[in-house]
Image (cartoon, helix red, strand yellow):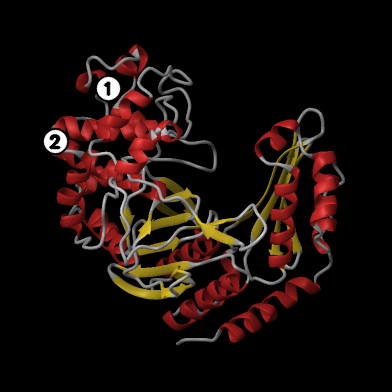
Amino acid sequence: MKISRTQAVAALLCMTAAASAQEPLKIPDTKPGRTLSEVLALCEKPEPAALEKWAEAHLSEKFLADFSARRFAEEQARECADYGGFTLTRVVASMPEFVIVAAYPRRVKLLVQLHLGLDANGKVRSFGVNPAMPPESALGADLGDKAAAQQIAALVEGLAAVEQFSGIVLIARDTKPIVTRATGYADRAKKTPITPATQFTLGSLGKMFTATAIGQLVDQGKLSFDDVVGKFFPTYANQTVREKVTVGMLLSHTGGLGDFLAQRTPEMMKRGVQRAAEFVPLFEKDEPQFAPGTSWRYSNAGLALAGAIVEKVSGEDYPSYLRKHIFAVAGMKNSDPNNVPHVDAKMVVPYTSSEKPGPRWVEADRDIGSPAGGALSTAEDLIQFAAALRSGKLVSKATFAKMADKHGGPPGHEYGYAMQLDDVYGRKVVGHGGGYPGVSTHLYLVLDSAYTVVVLANLDPPAADRVGETAKALAVARAKAGK
């Protein structure tokens, strides 16, 4: 069933009416709570000049070094206007140095969390409005195909109406789509519609391909998750990484390696990279940020090194390995490693929020692929990938289970082997997201079920999460109900 944007927005306003009529929630009377109250008061009538003045007085030096007061003011004014302010529902956490509050934007039925943290001087060190998991009771009793499709359509069109989403969401049981909803344009200038076969840059979602490649080689007995880097690169420049970091640590971000994306040369970005090993000199002399295996920190360099190990063990360059052993095996006919920059009619144009006067969204610089992410794929192909991954077609079920097990991550953000692990209403969900200017993606697999959720957006993060949290919740609720 297709509903119009007008009907969708009207439905959203009805759904939020009850929440808006509730007694206003009292924010804790703490320094962070009072500071958040000031921001929310300014949000009621968002004026960039007033927000900029507030930002200059309240944001920490570190915050302002990364994010100017003017940019903060303009983005907050725009977000407040888009959302129409917030109806607070509950205090999630309150400590002397931070506060987190759950709320519903008045113009969109989307649960969010507003968080604000202060430094030792009482200045704002962090602030954000992030999509959150809706309570299970908010999904309603009807979890049938029609009701699920209507709920997603209302959310997608409501977000599109305030320019907070452009992309596609697909919920599937096995490889059969249950909900498919697209909005916005792949190319705004040409008004090219987004479809299930539209190619998106995946960002870090592509890390799952690298972990899958490693898993295949483990199944073949060619390497082990416990092998150290030096087994494959005996002359690797950093001794600690060479002798102490294992393949599993590279995939789980527990090896202490850092990033390399900013070190990629203009020549790499212009002409592309044929082998993952070409990235290694960009970081191999770096000292680990902590003793390997003792902590967790997200690391693109770790995945790049894992991709170089795939090349060393398989004898194939990383892009060719993906094409032959993952895309072809899974039936992903419209996917590409994207290691060589190119433009195709099937590809979306990435759009990033402009910091200058004029159009709100401008074309972003395009990324290139690597073992850390950046490959191209479609909603249809990612459903095929998930089905092949959970069925044993790509890796053995024992290896998939190990990939989906906890190997690191901070509390509440557990991590496996290139997989983010979530607990949703008591069910385990695994997958990965991706974010880059003009790129926001997520793939979710509900374990012990056949449900998969794909959300792909050609806007800045957290565009995919705005839809993904609710879509993921619906998939889990349906799985629990035996739908």
Q: Is residue 225 visible?
A: yes
Q: Quadrant of residue 416?
A: top left
Badge 2 marks a residue whose secondary structure is helix
Quarter of the image that includes the C terminus:
bottom left
Residue 173 screen position, x and y as percent: 33, 69
Q: Residue at x 34, y 22 (%)?
A: 245
Tell me the crowding category of disc 2: few under 14, some 14 to 19, or many 20 or more residues within 10 angstroms, Cα based.
Answer: some
Task: State the residue at coordinates (59%, 81%).
Answer: 8
Query: What x and y, as percent, mark residue 60?
Result: 76, 34
Q: Position of residue 256 (x, y in %)?
A: 43, 24
Disc ID at residue 229: 1
Residue 436 as seen in the image, left or right of residue 318:
right
In the foreground, 286 or 16: 286
In the displayed structure image, the side of residue 156 where residue 109 appears, left or right: right
Q: Amino acid at mark 1?
A: Val
Q: Nearer the viewer, residue 265 or 423?
A: 265
Dot 1 lies on which element? helix
Residue 282 vertical placement versus 453 (above, below): above
Q: Find residue 314 and name its label.
A: 2
Residue 155, numbered circle: none
Q: Going 38% across and 71% down the picture, which residue do you hit?
A: 482
Q: Left or right: where does residue 437 sit relative to residue 13?
A: left
- The numbered mark, 1 or 2, whose residue comes first in the sequence reads 1
Distance of mark 1 from mark 2, alpha carbons?
A: 15 Å
Q: Position of residue 203 (x, y in %)?
A: 41, 49
Res. 417 in view: no
In the rendered image, the quadrant that contains the N terminus is: bottom left
What amino acid does circle 2 point to? Answer: Ser
Q: Is residue 133 left or right of residue 229?
A: right
Q: Nearer the viewer, residue 252 or 439?
A: 439
Name the residue rendered at 74%, 76% in the picture: 18
